Image: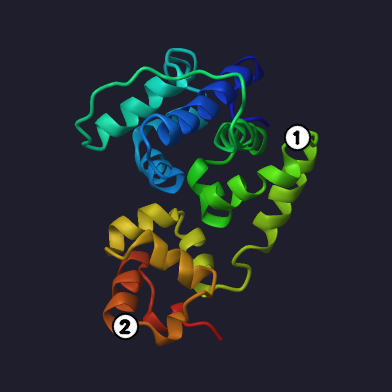
């Protein structure tokens, strides 16, 4: 079952595409920084649920501006600069909105296994392919991501996104990502870090250790 009525998906893809393009090229924000703000905002869940006041009621730049205002940024609205050429960031938003709708999962769940920067890198190979090829590749990456991480398994069982766990434990999202991807060894982590994670997940420290 799709995330919301398919009559809204074209508008949703446009909004996400222009939102990311606007954030990067008009607001001059790194895509990873802005997207994390989006994930932490109320607009992420509204967008994922197909809220018509968000998807149909606002343009992509307006959503970007609303996200920043909600997260405490005091900025003046800048008029978008629409151009004919579509940027990699535009494509990233275009396919990301489709995948979220198609698989009916949250943007945070997608980000837990495939980050926005990973999707952006896929542009060169996939931007001229049929969207089905992108979906297949995203499914493959999600299946294989973090498959043997104790932290990821327990966090998923607790129904927490990486961002939610970061807030509850006061451990940076990036650190959690590195432990789950085994870019850092959680077995060698500072004891206070592991204690905070265990407390937030309501488990024993030993449960978070990789075998």
Q: Is residue 10 above or below residue 115?
A: above
Q: Is residue 113 left or right of residue 136?
A: left
Q: Secondary structure at mark 1?
A: helix
Q: Quadrant of the C terminus?
A: bottom right
Q: Is residue 138 left or right of residue 178?
A: right
State whether residue 5 appears in this view.
no
Q: In which image quadrant can residue 92 be found?
A: top right
Distance in Å between CA atoms under marks 2 and 1: 43 Å
Residue at image coords 34%, 59%: 166
Measured from the top left, where is residue 95 in percent x and y? 64, 35
Measured from the top left, where is residue 83 in percent x and y? 55, 19
For mark 2, does the 10 Å Cα neighbourhood hold few (<14), some (14 to 19), or many (20 or more) residues?
few
How many numbered tags mark residues here? 2
Q: Secondary structure at mark 2?
A: loop
Q: Which residue is mark 2?
A: 190
Counting residues from the start of the chain, the first of labels 2 and 1 encountered is 1
Q: Which residue is mark 1?
A: 131
Q: Quadrant of the N terminus?
A: top right
- Is 28 in front, or is 139? 28
Q: Is residue 79 above or below residue 176?
A: above
Looking at the image, do the residues carrying marks 2 and 1 touch, with CB atoms under 8 Å apart? no
Measured from the top left, where is residue 147 in percent x and y? 63, 68
Residue at image coords 48%, 33%: 20
State whether residue 150 appears in this view.
yes
Q: In which image quadrant can residue 72 be found?
A: top left
Residue at image coords 43%, 57%: 162
Q: In which image quadrant can residue 165 be found?
A: bottom left
Measured from the top left, where is residue 59 in percent x and y? 45, 17
For mark 1, does the 10 Å Cα neighbourhood hold few (<14), some (14 to 19), or many (20 or more) residues?
some
Q: Nearer the viewer, mark 2 or mark 1?
A: 1
Q: Is residue 69 left or right of residue 81?
A: left
Residue at image coords 69%, 48%: 138
């Amino acid at each position: 079952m799709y995330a919301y009525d398919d009559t809204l998906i074209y508008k949703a893809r446009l909004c996400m595409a222009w939102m990311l393009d606007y954030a990067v090229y008009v607001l001059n924000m790194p895509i990873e920084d802005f997207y994390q703000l989006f994930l932490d905002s109320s607009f992420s869940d509204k967008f994922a649920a197909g809220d018509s006041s968000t998807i149909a009621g606002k343009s992509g730049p307006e959503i970007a501006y609303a996200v920043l205002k909600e997260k405490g940024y005091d900025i003046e609205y800048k008029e978008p600069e629409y151009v004919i050429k579509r940027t990699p960031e535009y494509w990233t938003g275009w396919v990301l909105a489709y995948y979220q709708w198609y698989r009916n999962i949250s943007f945070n769940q997608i980000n837990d296994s495939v980050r926005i920067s990973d999707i952006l890198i896929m542009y060169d190979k996939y931007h001229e392919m049929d969207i089905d090829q992108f979906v297949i590749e995203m499914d493959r990456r999600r299946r294989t991501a973090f498959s043997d991480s104790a932290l990821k398994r327990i966090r998923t069982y607790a129904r927490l996104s990486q961002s939610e766990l970061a807030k509850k434990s006061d451990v940076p999202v990036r650190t959690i990502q590195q432990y789950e991807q085994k870019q850092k060894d959680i077995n060698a982590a500072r004891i206070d870090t592991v204690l905070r994670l265990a407390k937030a997940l309501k488990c024993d420290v030993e449960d978070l250790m990789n075998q």
